Each structure stands twice: as C-alpha cells, then as structure tokens.
Image (spheres, helix red, strand yellow):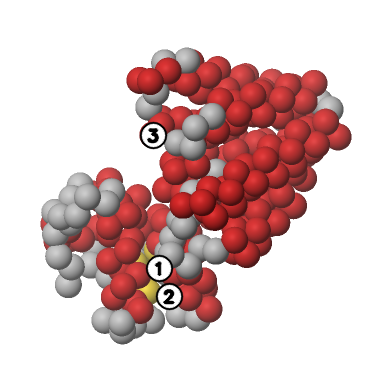
C-alpha cells in the first residue's frame, strides 16, 4: 500500500503527506481501514514511533479516526478537506493564517486567564521549569537546537491550556497545535523569534504565577499577535509559511 520513506522531508511529515495524497487521489476512500501501526512501520521502513506520530497528526487533521480495539480508518466529510488544506504549505495563505490565529487568540487568551485562576502549585512549578529550559537552550547561541525549542514551545502552550482546567477548550486547541508542529519549527528559526517567544512566555507565566487574570490574558494576546505579525511578514517575503 505504501512505499518506503526516502525523501529529505522529516519521516513523520512524509508519511502524513503520503496518506493525504492517497486520500486526495482516491486510493484511500472514506471508511478504508489502514494497516496496523506495526505493518505501516514495515511498509514505510520507519520506526513505530514515527508512524504513531504521523497517525496522531492525521487524527488531529481529521483525516483518520483511531478506534482503539478496531483499527485506524479514513474519515469522510469536510474535515478531511480542511486537514489537507491546513497541512499544505502551498495553500496556507495570509487569510488562512489570520483565521487560525483568530481562533488561537480567542481560546488561548481565555485559557491563560483561566490558568491564572485555577493553576495549582504543581502547575506553576511546571510552567517555571518549561520557561527556564527554553531560556537555557537559547543561551547556547549558534549551537541552539531548534527542535528542542519547538518541543518546549509546544509544551508551554499545552501546559497553559491544561492548567486552564477547561477540557473542551484544551481538546480543540491541542488538535490545532498538533497540526502546527512542523510550522512551529519554521517560526522559531526566524532570526530573533525564539528569544522573543521566551520573553513573552515569561510574561505570561509571571502573570499566571501571580494569579493576575487580566495580565495573563493581555500577555497571551500580545504574544500571539506578535507571532502572527512575524509569520505573515515571513510568508509574504518567502512565499511559504512558518508558524508559531
């Protein structure tokens, strides 16, 4: 069904793109059951962890449904088309970026305020550790590992959502953040963006630690707005999109 991964694209991304292409050309119709995780790893010649990450992304995109005990099935409906559009860097125009950030600014700004109200002492400690780890990595200068920064960046936003104690908002945003994993790496490689994000994350964390709802919301909104501006600027200059 699938060919081994051989391109320079990341292994996970290559699997996602391959599945999306087969859905688009009709090779994988709605309702079709995909091979098991183990069999897909053999067909793609990658690890099961890589396949698992790709399937998680496809599920977040709405392209597949992972039904525990039954298998992995291709989804039907508008969600698949939206997932394909979100994944392709060639169709991610400025309007789509603005729409995505409109959602992020609405939900994550509220989540930051809720986190300021509801975060436990353990939650606050976790937030401090995440910010400190990223600042340490950025301090390595030319040896900085943007992959690690991207992981920590997602961990920060995921933590704020989790600490909001609103499972509905958290689930919606976690799916969106899963889709934007590769995009985040591009964004953080923009000169100066990683350091800016650290400073902005520290301001958000400080407000949450103090329990200041309005300040937490203000800091999160400012951060996302700043990231959006840089993404749109980079998109217009380079004809491809990064994301936060």
The residue closer to the viewer here, 243 or 230, is 230
The residue identified by callout 3 is: 147
> What residue is at 51 percent from the left and 51 percent from the top?
237
User: Mark 1 packing: few (<14 Cα in 10 Å), some, or many (20+)?
Assistant: many
Residue 40 x, y percent position in the rendering = 20, 60
In the displayed structure image, the side of residue 205 where residue 77 appears, left or right: left
The residue closer to the viewer here, 29 or 8, is 8
Determine contact: label 2, label 3, CB under 8 Å.
no
Element at badge 1?
Answer: strand
Element at badge 2?
Answer: loop
> What residue is at 23 percent from the left and 67 percent from the top?
35
Residue 168 x, y percent position in the rendering = 67, 54
What whole-number distance in Å separates the C-alpha atoms at marks 1 and 2? 5 Å
User: Mark 2 packing: few (<14 Cα in 10 Å), some, or many (20+)?
Assistant: many
Query: Where, by quadrant of the figure, is residue 64 drawn?
Result: bottom left
Q: Which mark is residue 64?
A: 1
Rendered view: 44 above or below 85: above
Element at badge 3?
Answer: helix
Q: Nearer the viewer, mark 1 or mark 3?
A: 3
In the displayed structure image, the side of residue 112 where residue 57 appears, left or right: left
Residue 15 x, y percent position in the rendering = 28, 59
Rendered view: 54 above or below 244: below
What whole-number distance in Å separates the C-alpha atoms at marks 1 and 3? 26 Å
Q: Quadrant of the N terminus?
A: bottom left
Q: Which mark is residue 205?
A: none
> What residue is at 60 percent from the left and 31 percent from the top?
197
The residue identified by callout 2 is: 75
């Amino acid at each position: 069904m699938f060919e081994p991964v051989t391109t320079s694209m990341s292994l996970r991304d290559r699997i996602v793109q391959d599945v999306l292409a087969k859905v688009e050309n009709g090779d994988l119709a709605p309702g079709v059951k995909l091979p098991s995780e183990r069999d897909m790893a053999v067909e793609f010649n990658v690890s099961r962890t890589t396949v698992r990450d790709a399937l998680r992304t496809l599920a977040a995109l709405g392209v597949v449904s992972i039904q525990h005990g039954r298998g992995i099935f291709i989804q039907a409906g508008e969600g698949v088309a939206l997932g394909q559009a979100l994944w392709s860097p060639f169709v991610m125009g400025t309007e789509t970026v603005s729409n995505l950030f409109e959602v992020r600014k609405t939900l994550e700004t509220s989540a930051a305020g809720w986190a300021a109200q509801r975060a436990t002492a353990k939650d606050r400690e976790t937030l401090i550790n995440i910010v400190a780890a990223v600042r340490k990595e950025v301090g390595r200068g030319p040896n900085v590992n943007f992959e690690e920064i991207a992981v920590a960046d997602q961990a920060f936003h995921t933590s704020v959502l989790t600490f909001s104690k609103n499972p509905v908002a958290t689930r919606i945003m976690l799916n969106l953040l899963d889709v934007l994993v590769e995009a985040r790496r591009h964004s953080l490689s923009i000169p100066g963006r990683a350091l800016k994000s650290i400073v902005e994350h520290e301001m958000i964390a400080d407000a949450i630690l103090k329990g200041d709802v309005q300040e937490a919301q203000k800091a999160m909104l400012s951060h996302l707005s700043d990231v959006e501006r840089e993404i749109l600027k980079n998109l217009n200059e380079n004809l491809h999109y990064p994301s936060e």
